Amino acid sequence: MKKHRYQKLLEQIVNSEAKQVGDFHATAKMSTELLFEQLEVSRVVISGLSELTNTLETVYTEPAIALNVALQFRPQPLACPIFVEELRVNRHVASDHCVEDCRLIELNGYYQQHDVKAALEVAIRINGHLEGVLSLERHTGTPAWQDSEIQLASQVADQLALTLATQYSYDKDERLKLFLSATEQSDQIMMVVNLSSACIEYVNHAHFELTHIPKDQIIGRPVQALDFFKQFPQKAESVLAKARAGESSEEEMKLVRRDGSDYWVRLSVKRFISERGNHFALINADNCTEQHLHQSELERLAWRCTLTGLYNRTHFSCVLDKAKEGHLVLIDLRGFKRFNDTYGHANGDLMLIEVARRIRHFADINHITEIARIGSDEFAVLIADSCDVNVINALIERLYRQVELPVSIGTEQIEPKPALASVDIASIEQLFPALTCADIALQYAKNKQGDAIQVFNSALLNAFKEDAQIERDLAVAIKGRQFELYYQPLKDLQKQTYIGAEALIRWHHPKKGVLYPGAFIDIAEQTGLITDIGAWVLEAACKQLNLWQHRQIDISMHVNVSARQFFSGTLFEQVWELIGRYKLTPQSLILEITETELMEDIRLATNLCNELAELGVGLAIDDFGTGYSSMRYLKQFPISKLKIDRSFISDLSVSHESREIVSAIIAMASALNISLTAEGVETKEQELFLAEHHCHQAQGFLYSPALRVSEFGDFLAKSTLVH
Ligand code: C2E
Ligand code: CA
Ligand code: CA
């Protein structure tokens, strides 16, 4: 009868859905309830062994223990090694006097608290591994545990073990599926390669997304079928070899798809060994195309000139800083600013783009990579090879010839007029920055006649240092009253009298003695000191003119004005104020400026010339014939005088061409009703030629060099005596 009941109980558990689907909790609940019902026990407890904490956690008790008496739960198995070992070996402990039972001594406290006299403890085991305990408790020691009860409890424990095993295998399966779908969902490419067969065992969906190659063309195929292997065979072999040796590696590369489009991947390769001891490589790869595009766009913005696409100054300076040898070449476009102003910025841009194209073409042919636009009209090339001087010179000349070719802008052909400088980087031995040296050479190149090419050398450096010294000395020269005006007489060739004086500055340098303007005017102009010097000259000349006018000496005063001074914006006020202060006849003051300087800003120059002409002050074009000598512009300005440059005069006796030019200038001046002075007259023959051609005035060493003011007075007095 009892046997029959027990059999039914067991069948109920075996056939229960909870047991079949591996629901341990539900099976435990059902088992405790049934056992409590069928057996004469005070409590049934099922505890599970937690893997994480290694504790026996009560899964179910019948009747239930309130949660707040959790402390009264069974102790941890760690605390009861004897008990656990007993269960492991003998499967169950059946005790009718459990408090005195040495096998259960560790549970004594629990038994006492729960007033347990007899206990049947049965192991729930899978493959000999303890997974939990089924405990039957009684408050009395009688009746003693019967074999049928022990057998039933053991069979129930087996069913519980089976339920757990089913749950574990379901869990494992579920977990595998979970992992698989997680890797399939991942945006990162995951690939498993069998290291002994070099075949691809697995690849996730992300691989298709990136490469557009279907999975079935990859899985089971040798790694050599991958883009990475086809396009970087050596790199791929080395990555595989490293993986076999247990080393991890990371690579980043650009790959090309079958349709020709490209993409960037960053991959990391790591070896792992499966439980069965097989070696695999886990390859993780990311699509980093966006990042690369973004980065190259950032680099382009940070390192490139947006107009020409060449590198910019920042990038070039970084490269140059690291260069220990090779040649730095600078290319500057002379007169670009004027071109830009005259033809407009759009055309200026076209010119720069074309010049950049030529330089890039030159660089491509000669395998030069570092070319940059480092200023508005300044380009730089770094020739990395430190080759022979002759080779370099030939290269530089070729570059010069290419850049100097006319550029078609609209319907016009414009010559870019390059100036080119080069520096042998090794030769300056880190003493001076290469760019500084190249800049120095470039200044020389710009002022050269013919090909404007200058190779940097130590003489240039010395001259540069000298100039730097001059610049420092100039700063104190005005306050130190170190300047003096000398005066060179101008002779009227018809009347044979002196009608004017040109004020020429001299500098009594405290160490160097008397310095001529050639030694310092350009420096003063470049540094801006010319504004103060020019103002001083103008004032000194006007003061002197006033003294002469007081003494009834009727001569005009010619004052040289530099471009910077001319365009300073204050020249008109200065002149106006001086004429008032020294009560000068405005016509007796003549400002001299060169054509080239005048052309720097035609609109501004026209306005200023008109204002000065209205005031009555004369304007002379200095060094006429050396610049544009354009009739169109001459007519535009209210010019009162031309001064023929002395190079034509000195050539008169030897050059037929010079004679022609001088005659033409004389004819032109007379047609325009402009007064004319020939400069640098040194011989009687020159004077004769000029007089015969009706040139109005002459100036030169034939009459007198520039004189100090007292000598000039004597000179005039003597010459009037002569007449
Ligand atoms: P410039 O205006 O053409 O002045 C004439 C120069 O020719 C002067 O040189 C003069 O001494 C020189 N010269 C005159 N007659 C003869 C001659 O027969 N033969 C030769 N070989 N030379 C002759 P200097 O005084 O050395 O002045 C050079 C230049 O410096 C001037 O050329 C002028 O452009 C500039 N300069 C002189 N004084 C001033 C000044 O106060 N302000 C500015 N901005 N520039 C000045
Ligand atoms: Ca002059
Ligand atoms: Ca002159």
Image (cartoon, helix red, strand yellow):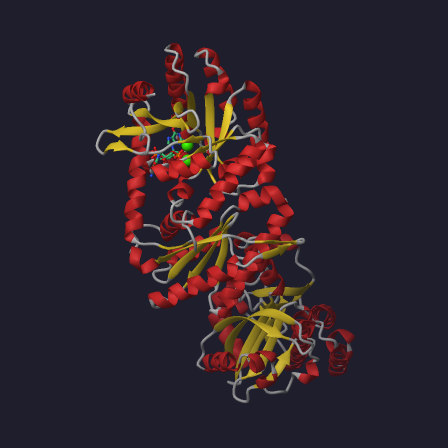
Quarter where residue 327 is shown: bottom left
Q: Residue furthest left?
A: 511
Quarter of the rendered image showing ligand 3: top left
Instruction: Tell whether 598 sits left or right of 211.
Output: left
What residue lies at 63% left-to-right and 49% top-to-bottom? 347
Q: Between residues 586 and 600, which one lies in front from this camera angle? A: 586
Location of residue 342 (image quadrant)? top right
Residue 653, given in percent of the width and then of the height, sits at: 38, 46
Which residue is more in the foreground, 566 or 711?
711
Q: From the viewer's perspective, is residue 417 above or below residue 288?
A: above
Q: Position of residue 642 (x, y in %)?
A: 49, 33
* Depth order, front residue of 681/420: 681
Q: Relative to residue 369, is residue 260 depicted above or below?
A: below
Q: Position of residue 4 (x, y in %)?
A: 76, 83
Q: Position of residue 582 (x, y in %)?
A: 43, 12
Quadrant of the rendering where the C terminus is positioned:
top left
> What residue is rendered at 43% in x and 60% in y?
382
Q: Write down the quadrant of residue 228 in the picture.
A: bottom right
Vertical placement of residue 679 versus 205, above or below:
above
